[in-house]
Every structure is written in C-alpha cells, then in structure tokens.
Image (cartoon, rainbow, N blue to C red):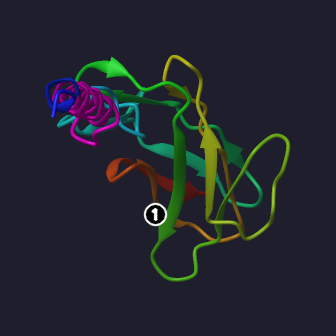
Amino acid sequence: MPCTGHLRVRVAAVLACAAMAAALVSPQASYADATGCPAGAAPAVAFASTASLQIPIGGGAVIPPGVTVTCGGATVSDPDVTFAVTSAGTLPVFLGTQQQFVLGSTSVTLEGSAQGAVSSPIVSSGTTGGAFDLQASFDGAAAAMTGTVTG
C-alpha cells in the first residue's frame, strides 16, 4: 500500500505530541506543587520570635509574633496557616482575629501574604492562670511557642 509510510509518520508524530503533553501535566514535573514548594522540598513554618507569651488573667489579650512559611529557603505565596492553642486542664485560652472573635475558639486558619507572612491571631485569656501552647501549621510543617496566663 502506498499510504503506509505516511500513516506511520503521522502516527509517530501524534504519539510524540501526546508524550510531550503528558510530560507537561505529569505530577512528577519539577514545577511547584499545591503548597508552593518545588517538587521534593518540604515546607517550614517559623514564628518571628519564640519568646514566651504572657497574658494577664481576666480578659487580657496579646497578638503573638507573625509566622513565615518557606520552602527550601523561598517564601510560599498566600499560605493558609492554621493556628491552634492547647492547654492542660480547663485553662480558658481562646483565639480570634480583629474582624471576628468567637468565644471558645481554639483554632483558626488565616491566609498569608504573597511574601509568605501570616499575622497571628489574637490570644485571649479567661479567669484562670496556667500554661498553654500556640501552634502554627501548614501542610504538615509546624512551629510552636509557649505562653502563660498570669495574674
């Protein structure tokens, strides 16, 4: 058949194009993944300071230092960081933002800037003293700082 040669060339060209398209959308490609990290790199979360927080008993509040999210030394744009506060026993310590403060909330997720910086939530106390931990996490990476409610 005289067309056989042309058909082979066209099939080879189509297969080559399909292989190139598959390489462009491959999950193993070297571009950034959903976290903003290059393939194979893990994110890191760091507070601007690790100094212990001190909150007065009876409705006191502080704004902890912000956090930065990086990956391989480069900042992650617009990260969603979850902040959570934990304490032993029944120590009432809560999280909120200037726009919304829900009494009893012990976790909140905040969006960061294009430079990877995230402002921390407001941490407030109740009427009992004691120690607590504040954790910031992003895609499996976390940073923590301690605090005390004193009076």
Front residue of 122 and 29? 29
Picture quadrant where residue 24 is located: top left
Rendered residue at 29%/34% (across/down): 18
Q: Given the current orientation, which residue lies at the most extreme bottom position? A: 89
| Chief SS of the magenta region | helix
Of the 4 image quadrants, the one containing the N terminus is top left
Front residue of 8 and 48? 8
Front residue of 148 and 46? 46
- Is residue 151 visible in the rendered image? The answer is no
Location of residue 60 in the rendering, given as x and y in whole percent from the top left corner: 73, 50
Location of residue 106 in the rendering, given as x and y in whole percent from the top left corner: 62, 65
Rendered residue at 48%/70% (across/down): 87
SS of the residue under disc 1: strand
Rendered residue at 18%/29% (across/down): 12
Per the image, the residue denoted by label 1 is: 131
Of the 4 image quadrants, the one containing the C terminus is bottom right
Q: Is residue 134 left or right of residue 105?
A: left
Q: Is residue 82 left or right of residue 98?
A: left
* Residue 35 within the segment the image draws in magenta: no
Q: Is residue 149 left or right of residue 121?
A: left
* Residue 17 within the segment the image draws in magenta: yes
Location of residue 76 in the rendering, given as x and y in whole percent from the top left corner: 42, 26
Q: Given the current orientation, which residue lies at the most extreme front position? A: 1
Callout 1 amino acid:
Ala
Front residue of 50 and 13? 13
Q: Which residues are magenta?
A: 7-29
Rendered residue at 26%/26% (across/down): 10
